[in-house]
Image (spheres, rainbow, N blue to C red):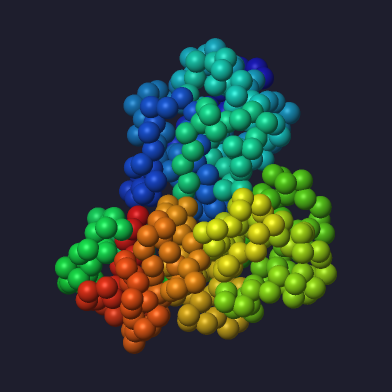
Amino acid sequence: MDIDLLNKLLENSTFLIDGCNIEYKRYFLKEIDFNQKLIGIIGARGVGKTTAILQYLKELEISYNKKLYISADMIEISDISLFEIAKIFSQYGGELLAIDEIHKKPNFEIDLKNIYDRLNIKVIFSGSSAIKLEHSKADLSRRALIYKAKNLSFREFLELKLKREFKSLTLEDILNNHTDIATILTKEFKPFEYLKEYTQKGGYYPFYFEDEKNYLKRLESTINTVIEVDLPSIFSMKYENVINLKKLVKLLCSSNPYELNITELSKKIAISRDKLYRYIYYLNLGSIFLSIYSKTRGDSIFTKPSKLYLNNPNLYYAYCKDTKIGTIRENFFANIFIDKFDINYSQIGDFIVENRYIFEIGGKKKSFKQIESIKNSYVVADGIEIGFGNKIPLWLFGFLY
């Protein structure tokens, strides 16, 4: 790579950084330790990883020629390794290299390892949630500090919608003080005025606020890109596999989480059970599916999920003609906890969290009949603004991050 190309990359980088809006920052940007030499941000396409990186670069008080943002799929660098780019940039005084969409660059793991080991430069990279760095050939899990970016929480949605700031809660806050907290919050806004919009019309991805009218169409396009581009680039999938993944997404809409039939699903797609398990694994990593397993399951990907959902309620309303309210309630709850807490299927109640708390999900008339004799058990009820005792409003869990 010559100096002319470096200058062109810096010019493009400066344009993107300078034009980035820093008015609202996602929760994960505030959690990252930017003192580390190698930082990775992984997550579903569309959750705001690119924006977060550009926001950080914009506020970083070093000159523009010392910080460089590139996307790994840029045509200009298609035949140049990431290590070569980092090396030349470092030689000309570069201090921080930000690499977006890194999963689209072949052998990125080796390049990152060499950059970390051989160059005096910091790297921030983003990539698909399907990247499994702990299994990569360079063993980046020992070098990189990885952060998982989740989709918008109900709390973040309200902040963007109402242009106000709300404090996130801990699980202990909600379990021990939910009545007082809900009483205070419902004086500031009415949760049911916004909860339907968040779950049905679109609130799980920040780009909803860019074009609310066409959000669901754009969401479907985003998911297609994950299936057609991101997953094949990571797992070297054939075209026929891409078609089957799309079929599986559609079929899940007609499957009740309680009645997951692996044999029936494999017959409908005309594939083996083992291949179906592998597809479920891919779609989980791509943040399109959300699997809940029994606590006693092994580590094999060929383990049947106890419950299988689309990743979040917005996907149900984008892909499914008929969506059962019970599925949406469970999905809302499970999506909040996955990747941030230990959540598993429970034979008593619906979920067990942190191997300690039992949660039964339902409507406002849901009773304690199934869990009344169980310690640390709670009813999580949709349709109530304020709870009492061990009955907690579902919407309040949307403030966990």
x and y, in percent, of residue 130 in the image: 61, 48
Q: Quadrant of residue 58?
A: top left
Residue 206 visible in the current orientation = no
Question: At 52% across and 82% down in the image, what residue appears?
Answer: 324
Q: Quadrant of residue 257?
A: bottom right
Question: At 76% across and 46% down in the image, what residue appears?
Answer: 236
Q: Quick check: 271 above or below 79? A: below
364 to the left or right of 131: left
Question: At 71% across and 70% down in the image, what residue appears?
Answer: 262
x and y, in percent, of residue 214 in the image: 53, 69
x and y, in percent, of residue 260 in the image: 64, 74
281 to the left or right of 179: right
x and y, in percent, of residue 160 in the image: 34, 60
View extreme (front): residue: 373
70 to the left or right of 151: right
Quadrant in the picture for the N terminus: top right
Q: Quick check: 309 above or below 141? A: below
Residue 308 visible in the current orientation = yes
Question: At 37% across and 23% down in the image, what residue appears?
Answer: 62
Q: Nearer the viewer, residue 155 or 254?
A: 254
Q: Quadrant of residue 249?
A: bottom right
Quadrant in the picture for the C terminus: bottom left
